[in-house]
Image (cartoon, coloured by chain):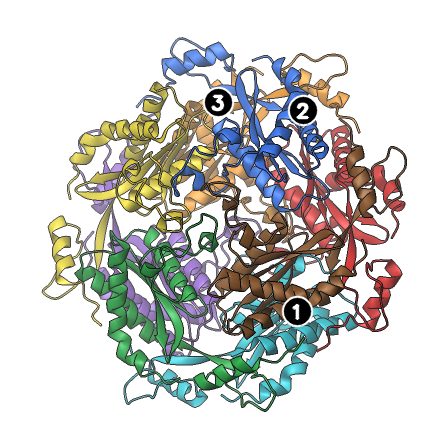
Chain colours: A blue, B brown, C red, D cyan, E green, F purple, G yellow, H orange
């Protein structure tokens, strides 16, 4: 049983600039770097999303989670009900974990007791992954609109607001 | 990132008389008013519902929740089983959160891991939203009858009992 | 068993302007009004609190809850750990529920299995109630500073930011 | 390993009239009878308690549980906070389970990890057991007053309201 | 709002001998009697069920709950896995709550978010209600056999063992 | 990083006869044997304990857990309240996990947030570890007597009932 | 009601060499032996599985549980998300409990509220049971690959690594 | 309300080399980098810790968590009980969250309902924070030794094993 990082992964890590410690010949890296949005970026994303929903005439809650699945920002609009908190959180967590828009994953699991049943995971439109420097760095979830598609449209507009900043992030 | 309430919502708020603080030109309201039934009204509703079920020969539990999703009244009839407590609470919470009779929402979500899977939400007939002054102010849930339709019929009779009072509530 | 609101409470309600429906001679009100901060106010409060902590050199999470105990805003600073989310929420909830600064309530319960043991309640400095028009309308909790007193100082500065607005709210 | 009820208990059961099936010489009873208040009695108790608190000028929640620990009635006054629901339920459950007034049991457990730490149990004044025909049949819990002693005083007044009825219950 | 038990239910109660206090003209009963199996009976039922499964060559867990949904007996055979504990409990609770054999209720709920989704409820064969004197007094659940039908067959044999005793219970 | 079992432990394992596979020179064992009471033994233990409590005039619940912490037997006497189920389980689990009588461990942890606070652990008299062939094989917990010392006395009498059998178990 | 192990099971136990105490004529065994992998074996299995996934270019979490359902080893690869922890645990637990590869059990339960709905159980490919000496001794679960089949392929390669050792375990 | 990172924090971030995107005059960074040990490093740490405990003659569980509080590695020694899993996880999480050795924090909170009561937090010796490049990157927790001091000594030896590697990590 070897503790070494296989060659393939070590190579990948180097290419992506993830590796924090200098790599020697046959040595796995000691640590890697994970990117996390600053709260300031996450808040801009959340507010732009919430305002896109306000413009669409709907009251929603918005949650942004980082790559560890931990909440960074929650905004619940004045008239959005309590349940939107839990649902927006689960959508953000699911979109980050499965790294894709939830609107495209509603049919990912169809048998009643597959992975989708695990607590905290929900497959309804309204969640998007967040990327920077070619990697997943978090997720955003929205709940409160009459349809999940509207929820997800708001999140997409929210991401537009910070897209240029995200694109300039160095690997 | 603007902190202001968008014009559209501010206008809506004014129209509905929700706004507590005087609005100035470009200023969002500081607080809004949420209506909540008094316990006395909620209790009348719960008892009228329970007695409608007794007349139909069924033992049920009834739960009334306010707009924040918090319980105001629970009544479990002498011979109704423990499980009716949890189910009536979830029905009340779901009818309030989705703002519609549950009997009309049983088919709202059909894929196995959509929003309906979230804990505390159930889509079986037997729950109704409560309105006053044109807004949602709570929900009522009933459990214990052999069919959810009977549960919901009781809730409807219960709401009839307080309908006139609710209709006279000023916005 | 009377369903009527006792005279004393009805009188109080009138004085405070809480009553939504016109009161007749011997009739309890049907509904009351509960004030809730708009999201915009809650967000200003949360950000002012978080920045007060940044100025003090500490990374914190801030949670604002309404009178129903439901979260309105969560902000977790970029380097604040996950645990600050849960603690700030419990502080906000406790300060609102017991209607006082937590720094003054650390000694409220001293026996090991009293009310303070209930889940979701915590008695450590760092939480404040929020008032408007003479009534409690929510709570704010802060976690992350080396001492709870610093957490609470940030919340106090945050409240200063919206104090004038809160004071102008009509009953 | 004997399945028989020991003589001592069988004798007690006979004396108390609990036994449903005729006892033969060396035979344990098949079933016993447990008394449960009707919902109507439980509701009278809860309302009398709540009104005693209103007269004392405090907004509380009241919970009544049966001997199985299952809720029969919950009443939360219009302005009582959400937390009073959980605390009144735990007080009712604890007073029933330990069969005594909580005000007399605050010092029952003093070491930090004794039985009092178990979830759902709380040792703060504000809960009373309910008896009929010489046996425990439920519990009542109150939360919301500034002191637990006031909570418990309300419960005591509530029990006064149904005392005569309880005293007439046959074993 | 009347606190009285409606005539229909009061009549039913009298017929079934459930009423503990003497009924006067227009008065609801104060308490009712709920039958509960003695532990000795419940244990005989559980062991007879477990041995029926042993004879069928399967290792199972058996749970018996009373009408309040509280466990009376649990037996897990030496080689039955941990999961059989939770499943047998849920089967016992569900069969008691819905008052029927689970093998006949697997199709009771078919939409994905109906009542069957509530925690603690499971609709797989292997659970039976327990009756005495014409009323439900508990439930039994079995888990561990390759098919739920075998689980339920064992429970049926277990009930046969105490059937005569149950039939002799007076109302 | 070596995967080998250190010499000291390997030696211990050999001495105790725990090792299932033949040990070669420098090879760790692949599997070990864990002893578990048969259900029949566990049930004898539970019943002897419960009857010792009946003789002492108290109604209790008894739980027996195996070395993995999983329940083998639960018996709740006819009049013991629901709470005794949870407490007896926690006592059994704690006595097994800490391998000692709980009556001797009530002072083991004294600071309020030490290990004793973890869910499922309780340090009140009424639990004993079960040993065979010089090793811990489970735990028994009792709840329901007015004092934990009486609970533990019953468990001790229960263990007396199976002591000879346990002593004859080969390592 | 006999406490004895029925002849059939006693015979089976003898054949399998599970019985720890000498069996006399009409006596059930007092204890049985359960095999458990040493941590060292479990760790070799987990690492071989994780490296098989690395070679396939996917980041996963791996969990190994013993026959009691308790975790022995968890490995989460550097870039695998948090959710893979919970899913790999549930897969390991389910494969052990139902004693089969999850890829063959995805259709085992098809109605929405059958046994598969119980918390902690998941029926998606990626879990395998672990056997030694003809009996189940644990389970392994993998999560993180785009498809469950890849997850399960890694687990299969992991088991290949320790297959010879497992095959040499004596009953 | 400004969205900008205050000057003080921006300066700190620059000094520590945390900032991923180039900072312009008055612009907050978009993302930051969080270091995470590779699984390979975390596993070396866990094994070195577990073997230090084996040498001390104790069976323990070891958990390593990253800065997000998510588990990276769990090792439970063959004879360590189930409870050590939960305790080692809580110790790792607490040491990381409070950034200090738990042996020095047992007296940090002394009133019964302070922050230490929050679920998942435990203040008993046996947990250490993990640092690299001057920042916290995770935590390690150990449970199973008769005293927490021994648990923590093992963790300290484990950290010694990877100290040189950690010290070479670049900021």
Furthest-top residue in this view: A25
Q: Is residue E87 above or below residue H136?
A: below
Q: CA distance from mark 2 to mark 1?
A: 48 Å
Marked residue chain, label 3: H
Q: Quadrant of residue E43?
A: bottom left
Q: Position of residue E50 (x, y in %)?
A: 25, 63
**Residue B39 visible:** no
Q: Nearer the viewer, residue C106 or B152?
A: B152
Q: Which residue is mark 2?
A: A41
| Left or right, residue G150 beside residue F29 | right
Q: Nearer the viewer, residue E160 or E54?
A: E160
Indicate the secondary structure of the residue bearing disc 2: helix
| Left or right, residue C59 beside residue E89 | right
| Circle nearer the viewer, 3 or 2 | 2
The residue that appears at 30% across and 51% down in the rendered structure is: E81
Q: Are marks 3 and 2 on the same chain?
A: no
Task: Give residue D126's mark.
Answer: 1
Q: Quadrant of residue E92?
A: bottom left
The residue that appears at 50% across and 47% down in the rendered structure is: B107
Q: Quadrant of residue B132?
A: bottom right
Q: Nearer the viewer, residue C80 or A104?
A: A104
Q: Is residue F160 above or below residue A148?
A: below
| Circle nearer the viewer, 2 or 1 | 2
Q: Are marks 3 and 1 on the same chain?
A: no
Contact (Cβ within 8 Å) of mark 2 with mark 1: no
Q: CA distance from mark 3 to mark 1?
A: 55 Å
Q: Position of residue H73 (x, y in %)?
A: 42, 32
Q: Which residue is mark 3?
A: H163
| Circle nearer the viewer, 3 or 1 | 1
Q: Is residue E157 above or below residue C119?
A: below
Indicate the secondary structure of the residue bearing disc 1: loop
Which quadrant is the N terminus of chain B positioned in?
A: top right
């Amino acid at each position: 049983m070897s503790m070494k990082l296989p060659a393939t992964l070590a190579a990948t890590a180097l290419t992506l600039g993830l590796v924090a410690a200098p790599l020697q010949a046959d040595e796995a890296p000691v640590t890697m770097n994970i990117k996390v949005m600053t709260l300031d970026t996450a808040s801009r994303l959340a507010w732009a999303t919430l305002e896109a929903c306000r413009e669409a005439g709907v009251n929603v809650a918005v949650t942004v989670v980082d790559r560890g699945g931990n909440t960074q920002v929650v905004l619940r609009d004045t008239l959005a009900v309590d349940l939107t908190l839990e649902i927006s959180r689960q959508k953000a967590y699911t979109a980050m974990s499965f790294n894709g828009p939830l609107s495209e994953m509603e049919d990912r699991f169809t048998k009643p007791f597959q992975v989708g049943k695990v607590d905290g995971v929900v497959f309804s439109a309204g969640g998007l992954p967040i990327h920077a420097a070619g990697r997943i760095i978090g997720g955003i979830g929205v709940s409160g609109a009459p349809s999940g598609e509207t929820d997800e449209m708001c999140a997409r507009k929210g991401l537009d607001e910070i897209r240029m900043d995200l694109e300039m992030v160095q690997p």
